[in-house]
């Protein structure tokens, strides 16, 4: 694996975690955020490291659907942590609605990335 990828994954995980804390704090108040919410953000670091290998695979895969699956697998766990940790704070939390929203975003994002990031021929 390229030495640049783990560093990119760490920085990306930290940025996503920081943004989630900021968005959660602005929406619900920083003082009202539970400790588990902050700890859940720490999961973004390994969640970005583990699937990082899917992105280089997606970059060289000529088949559109396989490329989209690699992008979806790469973003599935980090986005789940990001989305569900923030959704659970909402007093009107609906697990089914949150899951449907999560799947819709992952599928849409994977298809868009697969279309935009085609390998060179």
Image (tube, grey):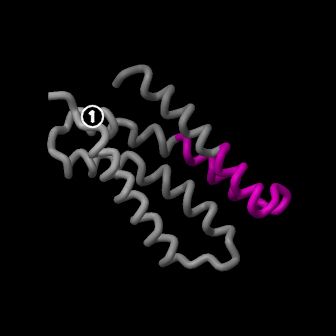
Magenta stretch encompasses residue 17: no
Residue identifier under label 1: 59
Residue at image location 24% in from the left, 37% down from the top: 118
The picture places residue 113, in percent across and down from the top left corner, at 34, 45
Q: Secondary structure at mark 1?
A: helix
Where's the C terminus, which quadrant?
A: top left
* Residue drawn where x is 30% and y is 32% of the image: 56
Q: Which is the main secondary structure of the residues drawn in magenta?
A: helix
Question: Split into 4 quadrants, where in the image is the N terminus?
Answer: top left
Q: Nearer the viewer, residue 85 or 121?
A: 121
Residue at the top extreme, as displayed: 3
User: Count of labels shown?
Assistant: 1
Q: Nearer the viewer, residue 119 or 36?
A: 119
Query: For residue 22: magenta?
Result: yes
Q: Where is residue 7? Give x, y as percent.
A: 50, 26
Q: Percent x, y for residue 103?
A: 40, 65
Q: Residue at x 49, y 58 (%)?
A: 80
Splitting the image into 4 quarters, where does residue 23 fall?
A: bottom right
- Which residue does the image show at 49% across and 29% down from the upper left? 8
| Residue at the outermost right position | 31
Judging depth in this view, the residue of 12 and 50 nearest the camera is: 12
Q: Position of residue 92 (x, y in %)?
A: 65, 79
- How crowded pointer 1 is (Cα within 10 Å; few <14, some 14-19, many 20+) is rated as some
- Please give left or right for residue 101 compared with residue 45 in the image: left
Above/below status of 70 relative to 28: above
Q: Quadrant of residue 61?
A: top left
Span of residues in magenta? 18-45
């Amino acid at each position: 694996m390229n030495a640049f990828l783990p560093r990119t994954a760490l920085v990306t995980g930290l940025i996503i975690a920081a943004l989630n804390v900021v968005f959660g704090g602005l929406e619900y108040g920083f003082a009202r955020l539970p400790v588990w919410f902050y700890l859940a953000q720490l999961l973004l670091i390994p969640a970005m490291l583990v699937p990082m290998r899917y992105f280089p695979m997606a970059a060289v895969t000529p088949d559109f659907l396989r490329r989209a699956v690699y992008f979806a697998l790469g973003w599935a766990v980090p986005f789940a942590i990001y989305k569900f940790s923030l959704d659970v704070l909402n007093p009107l939390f609906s697990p089914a609605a949150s899951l449907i929203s999560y799947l819709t975003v992952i599928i849409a994002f994977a298809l868009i990335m697969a279309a935009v990031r085609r390998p060179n021929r």
